[in-house]
Image (tube, helix red, strand yellow):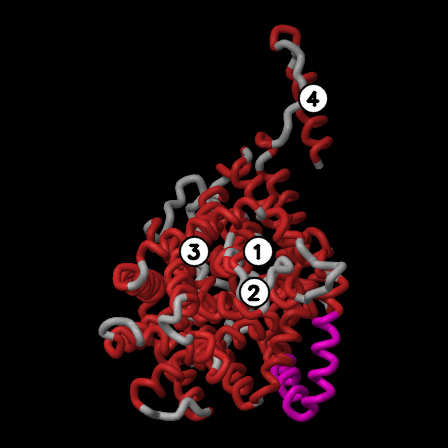
């Protein structure tokens, strides 16, 4: 393979910085842990309000731009057609954003909340039970998907509207930070931090997926879920990724996303039909009502008086983790959005993503809650004794035709994680490619080297054992500067729109046409544009 199109000046510092962070966590575990956890505690405790404000602000801004006159702007030339069908487009967005972590947390989160409920509720009380699914829906709902979508709009505009073929984040921010800074040390620091955030956030997701699939394999075959099985699974992910990439975006990624969603939804419907159907519907809609009724309250709840630590450990952690995915979600969503409007990109991401998550949380979460509350299955006992992964596997295995359903479940989880890995590798490859081709695709060789790099980072994280918590904490710390980068991207986006679409900006009051001269009309026009800039 040839790597002439790989941006070596960015690739090697980024991958080296990531492995340096991993090495520090391995060889200096206590010191690294203390520093990383102190930084995370400072961010969530002292700046948690800023994380909450940034997340809510992302949702408000995106809904505003989508529903305003700017929402009709096409991301591409006027005659550009969407590359993918709408269903494939929506499915790729959904599978890129959730991976295998969704079902893991759809079962795990309500169980954690059952033991330590939010909003001052007493554990085991009826009041506490109303928050179990409510908060899970909230954390996988509109604000999280808005954070994913926020960088995608400027990236898509930059790629398809301005026809740029180098997607380094520093180049995208050039209009704000200046060309000198974009091409200098500041620009390299921005790019390396952005890539590190993606690798750190993804390695966390990969850790959840591999542990979950490994637990399932142990249940089915008896093979121990040890480090060698986990490393073998990562190698299998890389090999499968290579096959998907050789098939291309349309035949590979799009088809894989379609199959994943169809299979996952079929599994969810099966559980809905064989489980406590009436309870699942009733509990979900009750929880949805609580979330909608208290959406503003829980969006800004920081518990500054009693200091239970719940919003810091969950909501603020989630938002920082989502912000760390700036490069992955921003570039991947931009890549598949050619020919779509800003409105289509925003509303599809936020509403389809939230609805898809709600579907699985409603079924898997409500089924688990019902099983625990009414003594059908000892879900909490499984989780406390063997971890969330084994609890999920035991819940699936307890279904009718459990052994067969468990195998289907493991296959679906593997495919879901494969699509997320594809998104991560494609996105970072696009950012570290010197010049993208006409279809905005990086070279296969660049994609493959990043697939191996991502796999190596994930393997190293597994060999670290307990030190993976240090990387998770560092990832959350990286989420803070990502907020600032998102704000700069939004500033660039609005500047580009002013330059390219002056007709969409506010018009000054023009004198009646009969009395207006060409010169006066032009003067008013210039004044209107100048006032907007």
Q: Is residue 228 above or below residue 400?
A: below
Tell me which label, 2 or 3, sits earlier in the chain.
2
Q: Quadrant of residue 171?
A: bottom right
Mark 2 and 1 residues: CB-CB less than 8 Å, in contact?
yes
Q: Which residue is mark 1?
A: 147
**Secondary element type, mark 3:** helix
Mark-to-mark CA distance, 1 and 4? 38 Å
Q: Which residue is mark 2?
A: 325
Q: Which residue is mark 4?
A: 524
* Quarter of the figure with the N terminus: bottom left
Instruction: Give coordinates of residue 455: x percent, y percent.
Output: 48, 81
Q: Which residues are magenta?
A: 16-41
Tell me which label, 1 or 3, sits earlier in the chain.
1
Instruction: Give coordinates of residue 348: x percent, y percent.
Output: 44, 48
From the viewer's perspective, is the residue at label 1 or at label 3 nearer?
Answer: 3
Q: Which residue is mark 3?
A: 358
Instruction: Give coordinates of residue 398: x percent, y percent.
Output: 31, 75
């Amino acid at each position: 393979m040839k790597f002439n199109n790989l941006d070596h000046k960015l690739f090697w510092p980024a991958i080296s910085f990531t492995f340096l962070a991993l090495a520090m966590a391995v060889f200096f575990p206590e010191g690294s842990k203390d520093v990383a956890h102190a930084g995370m505690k400072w961010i969530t405790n002292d700046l948690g309000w800023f994380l909450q404000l940034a997340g809510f602000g992302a949702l408000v801004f995106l809904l505003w731009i989508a529903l305003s006159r700017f929402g009709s702007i096409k991301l591409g030339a006027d005659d550009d057609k969407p590359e993918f069908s709408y269903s494939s487009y929506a499915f790729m967005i959904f599978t890129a954003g959730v991976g295998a972590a969704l079902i893991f947390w759809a079962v795990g989160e309500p169980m954690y909340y059952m033991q330590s409920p939010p909003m001052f509720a007493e554990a085991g009380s009826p009041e506490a039970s109303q928050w179990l699914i409510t908060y899970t829906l909230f954390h996988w709902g509109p604000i999280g998907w808005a954070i994913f979508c926020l960088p995608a709009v400027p990236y898509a505009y930059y790629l398809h509207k301005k026809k740029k073929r180098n997607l380094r984040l520093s180049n995208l921010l050039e209009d704000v930070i200046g060309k000198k800074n974009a091409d200098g040390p500041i620009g390299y620091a921005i790019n390396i931090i952005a890539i590190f955030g993606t690798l750190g956030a993804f390695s966390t997701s990969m850790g959840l997926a591999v542990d979950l699939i490994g637990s399932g394999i142990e249940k089915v075959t008896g093979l121990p879920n040890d480090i060698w099985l986990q490393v073998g699974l990562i190698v299998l992910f890389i090999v499968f990724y290579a096959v998907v990439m050789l098939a291309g975006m349309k035949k590979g990624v799009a088809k894989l996303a379609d199959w994943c969603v169809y299979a996952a939804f079929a599994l969810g419907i099966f559980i809905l039909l064989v489980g406590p159907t009436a309870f699942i519907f009733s509990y979900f809609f009750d929880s949805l009502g609580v979330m909608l009724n208290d959406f503003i309250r829980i969006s800004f709840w920081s518990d500054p008086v009693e200091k239970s630590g719940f919003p810091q450990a969950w909501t603020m952690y989630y938002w920082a983790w989502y912000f760390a995915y700036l490069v992955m979600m921003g570039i991947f969503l931009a890549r598949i959005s050619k020919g779509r409007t800003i409105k289509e990109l925003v509303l599809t991401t936020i509403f389809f993503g939230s609805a898809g998550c709600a579907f699985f949380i409603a079924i898997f979460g409500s089924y688990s809650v019902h099983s625990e509350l009414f003594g059908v299955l000892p879900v909490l006992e499984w989780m406390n004794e063997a971890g969330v992964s084994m609890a999920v596997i035991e819940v699936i295995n307890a279904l009718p035709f459990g052994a067969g359903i468990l195998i289907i479940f493991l296959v679906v989880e593997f495919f879901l994680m494969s699509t997320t890995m594809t998104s991560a590798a494609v996105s970072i490859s696009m950012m570290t490619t010197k010049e993208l081709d006409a279809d905005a695709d990086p070279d296969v060789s660049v994609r493959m080297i990043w697939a191996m790099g991502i796999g190596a980072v994930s393997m190293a994280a597994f060999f670290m054992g307990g030190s993976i918590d240090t990387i998770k904490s560092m990832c959350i710390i990286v989420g803070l500067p990502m907020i600032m980068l998102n704000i700069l991207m939004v500033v660039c986006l609005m500047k580009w729109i002013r330059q390219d679409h002056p007709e969409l900006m506010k018009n000054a009051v023009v004198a009646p046409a009969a009395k207006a001269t060409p010169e006066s009309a032009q003067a008013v026009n210039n004044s209107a544009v100048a006032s907007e800039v």
